[in-house]
Image: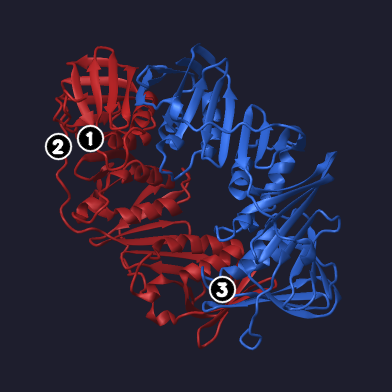
Chain colours: A blue, B red
Amino acid sequence: MKLICSKANLLKGVNIVSKAVPTRTTMAILECILIDASANEIKLMANDMELGIETIIDGTIEERGIIALDAKIFSEIVRKLPDNDVTIETDASFKTVISCEKAKFNIIGKSGDDFSYIPYVERNESIVLSQFTLKEVIRQTIFSIADNDNNKLMTGELFEIDENKLRVVSLDGHRISIRYIEMKNHYDSKKVVVPGKTLQEISKIIPGSADEDVVIYITNNHIVFEFENTTVVSRLIEGEYFKIDQMLSSDYDTKVRINKRELLDCIDRATLLVKEGDKKPIIMNITDGNMELRINSFIGSMNEDIDIDKDGKDIMIGFNPKFFIDALRVIDEEEVNLYMVNPKAPCFIKDDEGKFIYLILPVNFNTAAN
Amino acid sequence: MKLICSKANLLKGVNIVSKAVPTRTTMAILECILIDASANEIKLMANDMELGIETIIDGTIEERGIIALDAKIFSEIVRKLPDNDVTIETDASFKTVISCEKAKFNIIGKSGDDFSYIPYVERNESIVLSQFTLKEVIRQTIFSIADNDNNKLMTGELFEIDENKLRVVSLDGHRISIRYIEMKNHYDSKKVVVPGKTLQEISKIIPGSADEDVVIYITNNHIVFEFENTTVVSRLIEGEYFKIDQMLSSDYDTKVRINKRELLDCIDRATLLVKEGDKKPIIMNITDGNMELRINSFIGSMNEDIDIDKDGKDIMIGFNPKFFIDALRVIDEEEVNLYMVNPKAPCFIKDDEGKFIYLILPVNFNTAAN
């Protein structure tokens, strides 16, 4: 194989497919990036068996061929090359010479035959979202997936399509994040659970333009994302997702309208008194026109008042401050509404237009001690 | 004690004195920042017994007093306060209330009586350098101090004053860095070894303006740096520094003039083939008009040619690539001269004006294997 392409193109492609290279694996071939120049295109590919990414880069093929190169070494070499045309040349024993200007690297590749190609997925009805919308909705929900594998479904996000509505849901047993998106077209109803890792990597490699689209195909076992010259194929998580609708009640006894920035800054300040692992709740004491926040820890105590608009009953309720910070950070609205029933029932953070719901379970606290 | 000052002033002061708070200590009081408002000024102070920093901040003293506050908690609180006036109030039992707008923190301080005050140092003849010059000379030499305590003198830098010349030297047994600075005034001869840690912290807190000065006082045991409202006092390292003049020879058999950027980039590329702990030398094969660099490791090999001007004999010589990278990174000149005698004698990197000398010892290499 012999091919020539610019360092910039090569680096861009390598950075994209590297996201599907597993950090730990027992199969050495999965640690490789495959360069497939067996046809008329230069294709880079990586696959960790759950997530596969392939991207086509511009360049000239002087001799067709395929080679698998260690992803870490190959990407470091490409990154440090001068900004000029790069030649990659391999021989029958997989010796690979990467040269650029006067620099010449010799490394040993692997046969492409051993590489696990990305599965072929039938593309039927396509769903179209702007890159910006997909990237945003991932950012606004991904923080509340579960970070361990105890319940596989909790490590993914529900993508639920109904006509022109897309609902994205994540939950970890203590909180639920829900975002509603209106799409341009109408589609058949679909409900799939996409692995969180896939979404995290996708959101890193989508440029995020509001004018460019991502085309999505869904089958029983796979989801495919196509944008620019890149295709991402991921397995879906099997199983029936949690019935969240029965957890979403619109009854409330207390409604609070509050400046988002003030609430976020205040909780952020309070948490500096809480060391990692030390589960101290932040306590909200809500009365007419005022929310007093306070936290008590081994280090000291903190309290602060925030002006609010309140409807309904007074309430004193405690939360894990991290859960509030996570949700408030991804809300762009200047003001948010909090809906509460009692100190043991979940709190809902909502906007007026029905674009999002963040549900957070409260925690018990000892009123006397706090 | 009760005092009021702006968050910005308080934060600036806390950031400066925090540099003298030890990361690990068995004496809890050393982990504190002392706020001394016992006279007409608000003084912040920290002291790790080797390095002490004090800075005066603007503010209003409503009630005189002294308090020691845990540096980590205090600085985190200050950092997260709203951008407004901050009130610090203490009572006889060292309860401390830090308030700003509606936020109020309660923490417990310590008596200032237990604090180790910074030693009083007599100020005689002062030496004046611009902030920029001091910051630069530290950056250009600090990387070649020894990173372990086996030889205490190697963990510091020699500051040698002779008339209007300042020479700063650091060495670690494999290399020597020397910078020469011409000062505006003439001073008495002095030779002291300043701890590397002091210099590292100083260079972080000096703003670095070319128009502002640092005033330096030197006694037998201490060095004092004064700039703006800040005073840094450090112990000196005792002992006779290494006789470096006898290591500096101006004889050479090969002189190479080379573009600094090209050499640095090439060595930087080569090192990506070398994993940490794996001591592979970079080999320079110097012939008329050309330097071939190559490196061979378990991962692969790399070679590259660079155009040079050469005087004298051809030479093949090997180096630890890190030592060359460290030195070349702090040289601002576009071209540098390398002077060599033979593959076992040190290489000197020098400029034409005599502003610096970097000496690097070569390493053995097996010509056959490479």
Q: Nearer the viewer, mark 3 or mark 1?
A: 3
Tag 1: amino acid: Leu
Nearest the eye: A124 or A308: A124
Res B84 visible: no
Q: Look at mark 1 in the image and give the residue it sits on.
A: B359
Give the distance between the C-alpha atoms of the residues marked 2 and 1, in whole angstroms: 9 Å
Residue B247 got which mark? 2
Nearest the eye: A355 or B16: A355
Q: Residue at x 22, y 39 (%)?
A: B175
Q: Quadrant of residue B177?
A: top left
Q: Look at mark 3 in the image and give the residue it sits on.
A: A279
Question: Whole-percent x and y of residue A368?
Answer: 64, 89
Question: Whole-percent x and y of residue A87?
Answer: 45, 17
Tag 2: amino acid: Met
Q: Nearer the viewer, mark 2 or mark 1?
A: 1
The chain ID associated with circle 1 is B
Question: Whole-percent x and y of residue B176?
Answer: 23, 40
Res A201 visible: yes
